[in-house]
Image (cartoon, grey):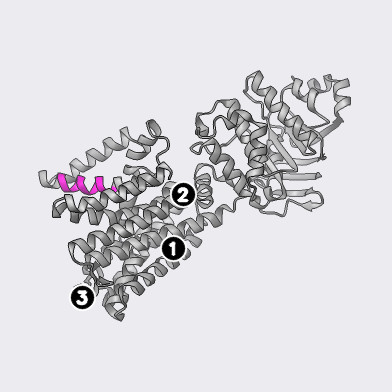
């Protein structure tokens, strides 16, 4: 077994053990961190590995969230079919958005994806008879079950989040080591050069957006399923910015950076808000310092300075 | 092999090529020569489809290249080593080679062949490309182009800024490629390299072909180089 896979399995095992060691509050936090880390991992595939800075990933997160929550709430779909609907919905949305947005590059790509996300957010508000707009709706506890397990309980929520996090981490680890992933990194590093070698860059970037969007949709669906809530605020602009922060802090283009960045951000807000009402100021200063001194993120810097094998 | 006939090209509204014609044949090294700004790199980019031509034709073994998308041109077995190397800096040596192999579906045999040409790279497979010396980076850029198993190799100033020992190694590989039957189109500034390697020399000035000479004629009258290149 190579070091990268061993590290991934070790992290998954440590997260499994953490549930039995940590106080209930932190275990609950960790479940949320793992779900949002799935979202950040999806974003990382587009941004960290392919170099596509999207500001519209909340649309994919929202597509997955509403795909699952609406099909369960309004059509009584069981958990697994609802999850599949969520994945298909987010993949389709990503395919359409990708096909259109990838006609642009750089800042224009950022703006176009941002506008798509905003359109998705407004759509969720427009159909408030179904989505209940900003207020959102709660998924009944009775619906949030899978194979006899209660996914609304602390243990059910934690281990379902861990299972999906582990599958996503192993999938991302496999993708970035596969020819497809290497080609994405080549595009990020030098797009004209990748073209000169014979890669169909546009098609590869489109596939990257679809996979990235589907993983983000999985995170949205998982959030709705485990935390029992779906609302339009999750499709709004701040939810497109959050995964960017998670990935930048943890390390873009590293498999575990999204987890580290998500955990850091959530605990930074959590701890600073327990100290003062001006917690955003503290968080802001810390983020500025980190960006100045660790411009490649925590794991990106660690990989550059000490552990070049870090995946 | 490669036939370029009276091509014209422009960067936006600025004309860059006004009529370049040249041939590159299998088993021969054709040197593309001219002063700075003459249009040598532009010709290379036009061959690779990175700059659309507005007139003329580019064919490889009779197949028109100028109608193809840029990503389809390397699949015609054309390897391009651009000026400045343009490696995938964060990937290792092995990964850079792997990316080259995957592009045209080449496998272990090609990998072994390429590494046999550049034993130095075999010693540095796990090293990141950005940490290699200039000469090693040039070797890697050339190796990656050879991963396509090209029948035409385009080299844009491959020895620029390298120390003599590295220049000799690159030169040996270019000569070996010629011996293996590849057509080589070489942009080069060093007189010594031109005189020792060229089977044909094509001079361009201000985006036009102004002279074509056989290598032996060039060696018999090396002052031609001085006249055209101003060196």
The chain letter for the residue carrying disc 3 is A
Q: Which residue does the image show at 25% across and 60% down from the upper left?
A: A159
| Of the image marks 3 and 2, the number of the one nearer the N terminus | 3
Say which residue label 2 marks: A176
Q: Is residue B104 shown to the viewer in this render?
A: yes
Instruction: Report the residue that reaches farthest toward the front.
Output: A1
Q: Is residue A193 above or below residue A243?
A: above
Q: Is residue A55 shown to the viewer in this render?
A: no
- Residue A224 is situated, as x and y percent measured from the top left of the image, at 27, 66
Q: Which residues are magenta?
A: A262-272
Mark 1 to mark 3: distance in Å?
Answer: 31 Å
The chain letter for the residue carrying disc 2 is A
Say which residue label 3 marks: A142
| Of the image marks 1 and 3, the number of the one nearer the N terminus | 1
Q: Residues within 10 Å of mark 2 (few under 14, many from 20)?
A: many
Q: Is residue A263 magenta?
A: yes
Q: Are marks 1 and 3 on the same chain?
A: yes
Say which residue label 1 marks: A94
Q: Which residue does the image show at 44% across and 63% down from the upper left?
A: A94
Residue situated in front as seen by the camera: A160 or A273: A160
The chain letter for the residue carrying disc 1 is A
Is residue B127 shown left or right of residue B46? left
In which quarter of the view is residue B150 placed?
top right
């Amino acid at each position: 077994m190579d070091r990268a896979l061993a590290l991934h399995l070790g992290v998954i095992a440590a997260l499994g053990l953490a549930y039995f060691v940590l106080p209930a509050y932190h275990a609950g936090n960790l479940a949320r961190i793992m779900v949002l880390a799935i979202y950040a991992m999806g974003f990382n595939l587009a941004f960290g590995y392919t170099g596509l800075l999207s500001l519209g990933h909340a649309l994919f997160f929202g597509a997955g969230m509403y795909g699952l929550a609406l099909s369960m709430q309004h059509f009584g779909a069981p958990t697994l079919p609802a999850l599949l609907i969520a994945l298909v919905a987010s993949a389709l949305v990503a395919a359409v958005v990708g096909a259109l947005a990838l006609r642009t590059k750089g800042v224009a790509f950022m703006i176009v994806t941002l506008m798509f996300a905003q359109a998705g957010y407004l759509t969720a508000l427009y159909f408030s008879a179904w989505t209940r707009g900003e207020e959102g709706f709660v998924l009944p506890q009775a619906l949030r079950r899978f194979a006899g397990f209660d996914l609304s309980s602390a243990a059910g929520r934690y281990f379902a989040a861990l299972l999906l996090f582990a599958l996503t981490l192993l999938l991302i680890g496999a993708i970035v080591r596969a020819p497809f992933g290497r080609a994405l990194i080549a595009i990020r590093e030098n797009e004209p050069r990748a073209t000169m070698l014979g890669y169909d860059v546009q098609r590869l970037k489109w596939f990257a957006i679809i996979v990235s969007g589907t993983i983000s949709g999985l995170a949205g669906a998982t959030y709705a399923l485990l935390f029992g809530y779906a609302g339009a605020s999750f499709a709004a602009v701040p939810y497109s910015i959050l995964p960017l922060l998670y990935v930048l802090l943890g390390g873009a283009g590293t498999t575990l950076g999204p987890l580290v960045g998500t955990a850091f951000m959530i605990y930074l807000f959590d701890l600073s808000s327990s100290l003062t009402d001006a917690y955003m100021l503290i968080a802001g200063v810390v983020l500025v310092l980190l960006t100045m001194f660790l411009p490649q993120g925590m794991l990106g810097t660690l990989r550059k300075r000490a552990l070049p094998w870090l995946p | 092999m490669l036939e370029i006939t009276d091509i014209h090209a422009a960067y936006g509204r600025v004309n860059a090529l006004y009529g370049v014609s040249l041939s590159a044949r299998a088993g021969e090294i054709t040197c593309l020569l001219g002063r700075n700004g003459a249009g040598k790199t532009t010709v290379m980019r036009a061959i690779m489809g990175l700059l659309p031509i507005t007139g003329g034709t580019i064919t490889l073994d009779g197949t028109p290249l100028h109608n193809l998308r840029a990503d389809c041109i390397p699949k015609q077995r054309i390897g391009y080593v651009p000026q400045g190397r343009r490696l995938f800096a964060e990937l290792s040596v092995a990964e850079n080679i792997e990316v080259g192999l995957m592009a045209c579906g080449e496998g272990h045999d090609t990998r072994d062949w390429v590494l046999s040409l550049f034993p130095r790279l075999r010693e540095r497979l796990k090293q990141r490309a950005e940490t290699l010396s200039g000469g090693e980076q040039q070797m890697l850029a050339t190796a990656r182009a050879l991963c396509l198993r090209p029948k035409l190799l385009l080299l844009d100033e491959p020895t620029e800024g390298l120390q003599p020992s590295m220049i000799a190694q690159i030169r040996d590989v270019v000569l070996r490629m010629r011996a293996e039957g590849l057509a080589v189109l070489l942009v080069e500034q060093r007189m010594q390299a031109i005189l020792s390697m060229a089977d044909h020399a094509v001079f361009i000035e201000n985006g036009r072909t102004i002279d074509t000479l056989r290598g032996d004629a060039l060696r018999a009258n090396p002052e031609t180089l001085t006249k055209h290149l101003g060196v």
